[in-house]
C-alpha cells in the first residue's frame, strides 16, 4: 500500500491549525477532531526537554483507540513578516514498511543464506549466517569474504565457486566441510549458488543457500571407512599385524588414540577359555596415536592390562556391545585417573580426553578382545551413530583376527604333526654322513607335505627318501605321514628302488579306487628313493615325478644325476626306471624337494644352476654346505616347503668285509665256522665268536640243505656285526614252531633269539639271509690284515 506523509500545523499558542491525511492515518483521528484544539491533547506523555530543544525526536502520542504510539517527529518553525515564529510544521517520519513475505522468508530461513556482490563482498545475510559467523549483518555488510573466515584451502574453494558463478553466469552446487568462527565443530554443507540479474539482465550479485549435511557427510565417511576396512584389514594371516591394521585405519580419522587388547589364548592358539567374571586380563598387541610416539599409552606393547569390572573395556566384553563414556561421567574420570597413576608421563596428553568408546572383538560367537578409541583433539563426542559404526568395524576386524588365529592354530598343528612324523634324529650308520634341512613355507597356504627319511637296510646299506605331497595344511601333513610309513614298510622288504615305487604307486591307486568319492591327497605326490651300498659303493635310485638329485664327486663340480623321473604317484600303468652309478668315498649327493628350486618368480634352470654352484663351493662341514645352499638359492620368504638331504658317502674297505664261497657240502660247515671265528679274532671281536659260530652254522647249513648253489658267506664289521649267507634259491625262509620230536626247524628261531635282528632280501641271483649282532659302543678298532 502507498505510504502518505503525516504532517500537522501548530500555531504559536499550541493549537492545531492544519491536519493532513497522513496524520489522520497515523493517529486515527480525523481533522474535525483535532483542528482548533491544543496539540498537547494528542500527547500520551510530556515531551522530553531535549526533544523540545532539538525540535526533533521520538514523541509518545495517544492513538484514537487509546494505545500509546511512539513516533519520530520533526518541528520546523513558520516565520511571520518580521521574522517572528508564528507556528510550526510538524512532520512524522514515515514508519518503516512491513517486511515483505520474501524478505521474511530470507531472514528467518532455517538454513544460512547470503548475497555477495561480484567482488565477493557481503551484501545481505540472514539470521543463520549471523549466528554462525558470530557477527551482525551490519558488521559483515561490505566486507570481503576471506576477511571474515580463516584463509584455508576449504575457504579458498568456497571463494573459487563464488567467482565461478560470476564468470560463467551459471548456478553451481557442491558439498564441502567448512567451519565457521562461531561454530563449535566443523560442519559439512551442501551449498547451492546462483546468479542474480538486474532488470537489464546484467549480473549484479551471487546468492547462496547452504544446507547442513553434516550427518549425511559423516555417515558417508563412516561407510567409506568400512569399505576401506574390507581391503586394509586382514592383509596377512598374522594376529598382531591384523590388530595393527585396525589401529592404522581409525587413527586419526576416527580416534586420536586407539588400542587393541586381546585375550592371551588368542595369541597362543590354545583352546577357547571362558570369560572371567571379575577382572579381565588382556594383552596389548597394538596401539596408535595422533601424537608421535603414542605418549598417551599407559600399557606397552606386549604387556598385560587388568581391566576392572567397572571399566568401559570390561563392560564392553561382558555386555557384548560398544560402550561410550563422555567427559564428566564417573567411568571416564576413573579410567583417566587410573591411566595417569600408571603412566604419569602421559598425563598432559590425556587432559583433553572428552569421549571414549570400547568395542568388543567377537567372531563366530567367541570373544577375542577389545578395541578402544579415545578422542582428545577431535571436537565431537562419540554418538549413537558412532557406536553402530564401531560395532560393525569391530565385527569385521574380529573376523580377520579370528581367521589369523585359526590359521596360526592350524599351522602350528600341522607343523607339530609334521615334526612328529619327520625323523627327529637320523639313525647312526657307517654308510653315509647325513645332514638335513627342513624349512616350512611362510605363505598363507600353510605347511606343505614335504618329507625326507634315512632308512637303515641290511648289509650296512642305507635307503634315502625325499618326497612331496600336493597341497598344504594338516591333510597334507597326515598324507605325508602315511606315505613315509608305506615307504619304510616297503624298504624293510629290501625292494629295489624302482620296484618300491611301483608298489607305492599301486598303493596310492588302490586308495583312490576304494575311496568314498573324496579326493585322495596322495594323488600327485612325488617321491625319490635311493639305496647306497658302502661295500660296493653302488648307488641305485628311482623317482616318481621328483627332481633328480645332484652329485658332487671329490674335487669336482656338482651335476644332476641323469635319470628318468617317471610319473607322479597315483597315475598307474607306467613303469619306473632305476638309475645306477658307482660313487667314490667322499662323494656328496643332494636330494631335495621342488620348493628349493621352483617358484613362480624364479627360473628353474637358473635356480638349479645356482644350487649346483653352491654345492661345488668348498665348505668346512656338511652342515655349512647345507646352509650355503639355502642362502644361495632360496628367497627371503619361500613360497613352498623345502626339504634338503645332503649325504656324503663312506666306504667299507676290505679290512671290514670278509667273503667266502661255500661248497654245497654239509661237511664244509665246520671249516667256515672256524674261518669266521678267526676273522673275529683278527677284528678284536672274540666276545662275539660264540654267537657268530652258531649263526654261521645255522645259516650256512640251511643254505646248503634247502637252497641252491652258489652259496656265499659274508661278514661285515660295521656299527653292528653282520653275517650274510646268500644262495641261488629265491624261496624266502620263515620262522616256524618245531614240535618236541622234530629233528629240525629250530635254526632260524635260534638265530632270531641270539641276534639283534635278522631278515632276508631278494637278489638278482637268489636271496640273502642276514643277521646282526650289536657291538660295544666306541670307535671301531683298526686291524692290520
Image: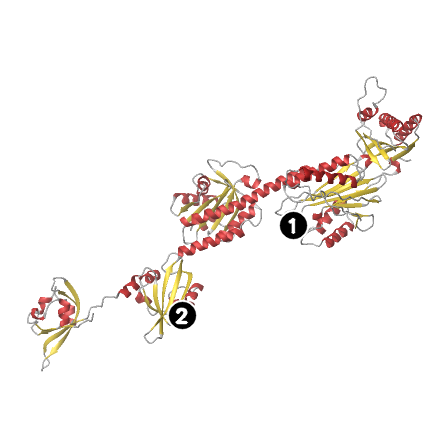
Work out which quarter of the rendered image holds the N terminus and state it: bottom left
Closest to the observer, 33 or 265: 33
Residue at the spot of label 2: 170
Task: Give the quarter of the image for residue 130.
Answer: bottom left
Residue 777 seen from this side = yes
Please say if 140 is above or below 307: below
In this rendering, which labeled residue sits more in front, label 2 or label 1? 2
Q: How far apart are marks 2 and 1 (CA)?
A: 59 Å
Q: Where is residue 635 in the image (x, y as percent from the top left)?
A: 67, 51
Query: Is label 2 in a helix, a strand or a loop?
Result: loop
Does residue 298 appear left or right of residue 633 in this picture? left
Which label's residue is closer to the chain start, 2 or 1? 2
Q: Which residue lies furthest to the bottom in this view?
A: 81
Residue at the spot of label 1: 637
Q: Where is residue 183 in the image (x, y as percent from the top left)?
A: 37, 58
Query: Residue drawn 38% across and 66% down?
Result: 193
Task: Give the quarter of the image for residue 337.
Answer: top left
Query: Is label 1 in a helix, a strand or a loop?
Result: loop
Does residue 241 appear left or right of residue 558 in this picture? left
- Label drawn at residue 703: none
Please say if 710 is above or below 736: below
Q: Which residue lies furthest to the top in this view?
A: 741
Amino acid at each position: 500500500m502507498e505510504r502518505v506523509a503525516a504532517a500537522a500545523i501548530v500555531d504559536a499558542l499550541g493549537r492545531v491549525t492544519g491536519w493532513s491525511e497522513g496524520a489522520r492515518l497515523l493517529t486515527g483521528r480525523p481533522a474535525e477532531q483535532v483542528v482548533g484544539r491544543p496539540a498537547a491533547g494528542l500527547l500520551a506523555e510530556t515531551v522530553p526537554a531535549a526533544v523540545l530543544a532539538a525540535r526533533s525526536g521520538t514523541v509518545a502520542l495517544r492513538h484514537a483507540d487509546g494505545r500509546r504510539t511512539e513516533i519520530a517527529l520533526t518541528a520546523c518553525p513558520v516565520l511571520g513578516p518580521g521574522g517572528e515564529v508564528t507556528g510550526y510544521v510538524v512532520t512524522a517520519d514515515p514508519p518503516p514498511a512491513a517486511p515483505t513475505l520474501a524478505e521474511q522468508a530470507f531472514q528467518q530461513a532455517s538454513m544460512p543464506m547470503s548475497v555477495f556482490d561480484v567482488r565477493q563482498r557481503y551484501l545481505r545475510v540472514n539470521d543463520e549466517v549471523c549466528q554462525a559467523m558470530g557477527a551482525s549483518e551490519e558488521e559483515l555488510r561490505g566486507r570481503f569474504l576471506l576477511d571474515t573466515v580463516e584463509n584455508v584451502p576449504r575457504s579458498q574453494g568456497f571463494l573459487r565457486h563464488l567467482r565461478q558463478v560470476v564468470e560463467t553466469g551459471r548456478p553451481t552446487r557442491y558439498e564441502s566441510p567448512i567451519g565457521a568462527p562461531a561454530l563449535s565443530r566443523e560442519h559439512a554443507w551442501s551449498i547451492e549458488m546462483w546468479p542474480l540479474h538486474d532488470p537489464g539482465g546484467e549480473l549484479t550479485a551471487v546468492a547462496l543457500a547452504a544446507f547442513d549435511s553434516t550427518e549425511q557427510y559423516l555417515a558417508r565417511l563412516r561407510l567409506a571407512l568400512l569399505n576401506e576396512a574390507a581391503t586394509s584389514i586382514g592383509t596377512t594371516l598374522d594376529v598382531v599385524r591384523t590388530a595393527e591394521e585396525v589401529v592404522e585405519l581409525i587413527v586419526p580419522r576416527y580416534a586420536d588414540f586407539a588400542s587393541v587388547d586381546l585375550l592371551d589364548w588368542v595369541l597362543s592358539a590354545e583352546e577357547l577359555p571362558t570369560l572371567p567374571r571379575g577382572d579381565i586380563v588382556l594383552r596389548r598387541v597394538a596401539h596408535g596415536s595422533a601424537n608421535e610416539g603414542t605418549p598417551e599409552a599407559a600399557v606397552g606393547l606386549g604387556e598385560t592390562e587388568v581391566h576392572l569390572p567397572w571399566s568401559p573395556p570390561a563392560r564392553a566384553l561382558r555386555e557384548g556391545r560398544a560402550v561410550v563414556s563422555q567427559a564428566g561421567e564417573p567411568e571416564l574420570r576413573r579410567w583417566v585417573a587410573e591411566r595417569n597413576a600408571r603412566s604419569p608421563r602421559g598425563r598432559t596428553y590425556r587432559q583433553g580426553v572428552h569421549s571414549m568408546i570400547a568395542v568388543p572383538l567377537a567372531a563366530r560367537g567367541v570373544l577375542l578382545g577389545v578395541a578402544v578409541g579415545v578422542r582428545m583433539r577431535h571436537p565431537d563426542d562419540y554418538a549413537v551413530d558412532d557406536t553402530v559404526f564401531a560395532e560393525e568395524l569391530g565385527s569385521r576386524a574380529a573376523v580377520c583376527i579370528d581367521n589369523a588365529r585359526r590359521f596360526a592354530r592350524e599351522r602350528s598343528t600341522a607343523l607339530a604333526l609334521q615334526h612328529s612324523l619327520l625323523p627327529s634324529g637320523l639313525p647312526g650308520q657307517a654308510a653315509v654322513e647325513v645332514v638335513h634341512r627342513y624349512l616350512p613355507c611362510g605363505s598363507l597356504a600353510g605347511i606343505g607335505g614335504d618329507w625326507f627319511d634315512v632308512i637303515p637296510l641290511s648289509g650296512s646299506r642305507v635307503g634315502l627318501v625325499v618326497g612331496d605331497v600336493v597341497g598344504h595344511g594338516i591333510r597334507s601333513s597326515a598324507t605325508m605321514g602315511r606315505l613315509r610309513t608305506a615307504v619304510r614298510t616297503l624298504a624293510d622288504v629290501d625292494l629295489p628302488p624302482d620296484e618300491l615305487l611301483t608298489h607305492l604307486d599301486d598303493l596310492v591307486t588302490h586308495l583312490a579306487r576304494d575311496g568314498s568319492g573324496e579326493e585322495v591327497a596322495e594323488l600327485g605326490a612325488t617321491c625319490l628313493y635311493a639305496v647306497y651300498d658302502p661295500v660296493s659303493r653302488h648307488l641305485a635310485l628311482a623317482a616318481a615325478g621328483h627332481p633328480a638329485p645332484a652329485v658332487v664327486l671329490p674335487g669336482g663340480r656338482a651335476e644332476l644325476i641323469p635319470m628318468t623321473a617317471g610319473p607322479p604317484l597315483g597315475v598307474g600303468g607306467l613303469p619306473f626306471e632305476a638309475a645306477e652309478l658307482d660313487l667314490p668315498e667322499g662323494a656328496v649327493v643332494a636330494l631335495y624337494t621342488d620348493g628349493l628350486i621352483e617358484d613362480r618368480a624364479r627360473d628353474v634352470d637358473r635356480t638349479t644352476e645356482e644350487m649346483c654352484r653352491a654345492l661345488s663351493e668348498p665348505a668346512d662341514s656338511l652342515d655349512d654346505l647345507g646352509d650355503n645352499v639355502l642362502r644361495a638359492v632360496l628367497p627371503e620368504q619361500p613360497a613352498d616347503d623345502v626339504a634338503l638331504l645332503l649325504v656324503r658317502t663312506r666306504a667299507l674297505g676290505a679290512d671290514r668285509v670278509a667273503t667266502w664261497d661255500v661248497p654245497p657240502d654239509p661237511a664244509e660247515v665246520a671249516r667256515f665256522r672256524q674261518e669266521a671265528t678267526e676273522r673275529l679274532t683278527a677284528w678284536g671281536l672274540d666276545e662275539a665268536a660264540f654267537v657268530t659260530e652258531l649263526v654261521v652254522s645255522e645259516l650256512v647249513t640251511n643254505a646248503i640243505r634247502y637252497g641252491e648253489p652258489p652259496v656265499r658267506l659274508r661278514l661285515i664289521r660295521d656299527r653292528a656285526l653282520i653275517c650274510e649267507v646268500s644262495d641261488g634259491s629265491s624261496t624266502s625262509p620263515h620262522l616256524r614252531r618245531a614240535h618236541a620230536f622234530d629233528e629240525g626247524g629250530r635254526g632260524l628261531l635260534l638265530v632270531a633269539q641270539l641276534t639283534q635282528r635278522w631278515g632276508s632280501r631278494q637278489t638278482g641271483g637268489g636271496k640273502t639271509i642276514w643277521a646282526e649282532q650289536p657291538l660295544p659302543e666306541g670307535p671301531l678298532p683298526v686291524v692290520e690284515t
